[in-house]
Image: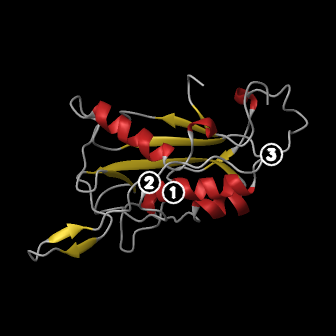
């Protein structure tokens, strides 16, 4: 692809689309020594490993531009229908992100992120309490599904990932949350596999 490498992840960060502030819910709860519930947080972040395989150039790589790509994408790509009731528009379940990529031809996903203050990490779900069903609760787990598929198909065109932060982006926390989000992304995808506006 002209000026773009194959097998990259494109990220679009959509900030401030929803002004609501929602309480974050822990990944899991376990009893603490004091008998109170405490979050069971995901393991510490690592560093995204470089790709070990190279893709084969496509026949249009020299002429096709990123803005000329057409692709199938899903909204709330992690979504699982609530067990009981809920709004009519929540009555659907997506396949896992890995299955959407491998079996349904999806090349664009959208993830709603929520800041979990207790763990200092991002989680992925729609709305707390009412619509929390998800195929990958931990943000880095969602990204790991993308990375696994990407590594198995290194000649793919860029995958598009739209992130919609649902909370934690107030004036006093925005910069720290952006740094945390980038750290989580780079724990799965090394910088050379991520397309940003400056790269």
Q: Is residue 162 above or below residue 60?
A: below
Mark 1 is surrounded, within 10 Å at the Cα level, by few (under 14), some (14 to 19) or many (20 or more) other residues, namely: many
Q: Is residue 183 above or below residue 93?
A: above
Picture quadrant of residue 43: bottom left
Is 198 left, or right, of 43 in this rendering? right
Label pair 2/1, CB-CB below 8 angstroms: yes
Q: Which residue is mark 1?
A: 142
Q: Which residue is mark 3?
A: 55
Q: Marks 1/3: CA distance?
A: 23 Å
Element assignment for label 1: helix
Q: Which residue is mark 2?
A: 139
Is 165 left, or right, of 118 in this rendering? right
Picture quadrant of residue 124: bottom left
What residue is at 56 percent from the left and 29 percent from the top?
A: 196
- Residue 18 visible, this angle: no
Q: Marks 2/1: CA distance?
A: 5 Å
Spot occupied by residue 31 in the image (x, y as percentages of width and height): 18, 76
- Residue 140 visible, this angle: yes
Spot occupied by residue 57 in the image (x, y as percentages of width and height): 86, 39
What is the quadrant of the N terminus in the image? top right
Residue in the foreground of this view, choosing between 188 and 165: 188
Mark 3 vs 2, N-terminal side? 3
Spot occupied by residue 155 in the image (x, y as percentages of width and height): 79, 46
Point out the frontmost of discs 3 and 2.
3
Q: How many marks?
A: 3
Mark 1 vs 3, N-terminal side? 3
């Amino acid at each position: 692809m002209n000026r773009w490498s194959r097998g990259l992840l494109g990220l679009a960060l959509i900030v401030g689309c929803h002004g609501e502030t929602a309480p974050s819910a822990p990944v899991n709860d376990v009893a603490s020594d004091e008998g109170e519930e405490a979050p069971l947080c995901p393991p510490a972040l690592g560093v995204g490993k470089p790709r070990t395989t190279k893709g084969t150039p496509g026949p249009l790589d020299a002429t096709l531009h990123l803005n000329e790509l057409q692709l199938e994408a899903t909204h709330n790509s992690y979504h699982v229908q609530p067990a009981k009731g809920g709004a009519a528009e929540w009555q659907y379940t997506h396949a896992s992100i890995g299955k959407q990529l491998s079996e349904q031809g999806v090349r664009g996903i959208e993830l709603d992120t929520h800041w979990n203050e207790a763990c200092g990490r991002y989680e992925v779900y729609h709305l707390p309490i009412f619509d929390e069903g998800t195929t990958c609760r931990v943000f880095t787990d969602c990204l790991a599904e993308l990375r696994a598929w990407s590594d198995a198909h290194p000649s793919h065109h860029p995958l598009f990932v739209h992130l919609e932060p649902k909370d934690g982006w107030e004036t006093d926390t925005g910069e720290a949350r952006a740094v945390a989000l980038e750290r989580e992304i780079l724990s799965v995808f090394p910088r050379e596999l991520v397309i940003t506006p400056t790269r």
